Amino acid sequence: MTHIDVVAVTHRGRQRDYNQDTVAVAGFQSGVLEGQPVRFAIDPVRPVTCLVADGLGGLAEGARASRVAAATITDAAPLFHDQDAVVRAVHQANDAVYAEMALTPAWSGMGSTVVLLVLAGDRAICANVGDSRCFLLRDAHLVQLSQDDSMTPAGEETIATVVTQALGGTPRPTAVTPHVLETEVAPGDRFLLCSDGLTDELDVERIEEELVKAADPRSAVSALLRAALDAGARDNVSIVLVTVPEPPAEPTGTAQEGNLP
């Protein structure tokens, strides 16, 4: 497999004063991704890991929680050859958030979602806790691979969702049960990771439309971010688009067999 193409961006949105999301791409974290999409070409000589962690809005130190979670998982990423290793890292991230929380009373209750994608050879592993999502675009059809840990209170608008499971998020340590899915990778597959700042503003059909019609991955990420901002971007918006390369094109000419004169 040639290089994996990854485009990532995170944005504080239209209504938030700060950004609680953390994005990580093969060891790089959010600092270089703020506001404008950045493209990475990653050699898949070892497992390629990308993630989005969304600090819980309205809770103390959500940004700190998302950074701790992202750093813990990124540190373990070179070992991500199977589902068990990924699940262990998510549990370690949960423990790390609680350990950080114990340092200062003001950080009590801080928490974060996480969704991560690991490409290892011809396999992809998706894992999540919370309501950040992973999608797969294949043959122009978008399907969700992650499972939402969220609910909408009766009588509330769609934006008013409650996260039912997170890394941290409670005053006392609470175990998590990550959702994990493994699938075979096909040439041309595109995997989309995002915080709910995107999916609260755009439905799946609109996201699919923007991905399909875009000329290239960077244009797709730019279009999705622009659409979320145009829709109001009530929350931070983070997007990671991972593209599996197509096989090299066949030569246009073919050698002709025959006898020499």
Image (tube, rainbow, N blue to C red):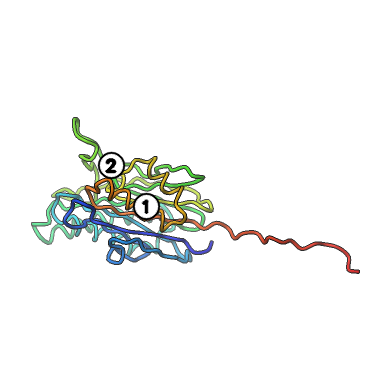
User: Which of the marked residues, 2 or 1, is nearer the chain's N terminus?
Assistant: 2
Pointer 1 local density, CA inside 10 Å: few below 14, some 14–19, many at least 20: some
Residue nearest the observer in this picture, 155 or 219: 219
Q: Specify whether 230 is left or right of 16.
A: right
- Secondary structure, mark 2, is loop
The one of 1 and 83 positioned closer to us in this rendering = 1
Give the Cα separation between the discs numbered 2 and 1.
27 Å
Residue extending furthest toward the front: 230
**Three-letter amino acid code of the residue under disc 1:** Ala
State the image coordinates of residue 225 (x, y, percent, origin top left): 32, 53
The residue at which mark 1 appears reads as 223
Which quadrant of the rendered structure holds the C terminus? bottom right
Location of residue 18 by image quarter: bottom left
Residue at 42%, 42% (x, y): give it.
Answer: 143
Q: Residue furthest top?
A: 155
Q: Quarter of the image holding residue 47?
A: bottom left
Q: Please report the residue visible at 20 percent of the width from the left and 39 percent of the height from the top.
A: 160
Q: Dot 2 corresponds to which residue? A: 149
Q: Residues within 10 Å of mark 2 (few under 14, many from 20)?
A: some
Tag 2: amino acid: Asp
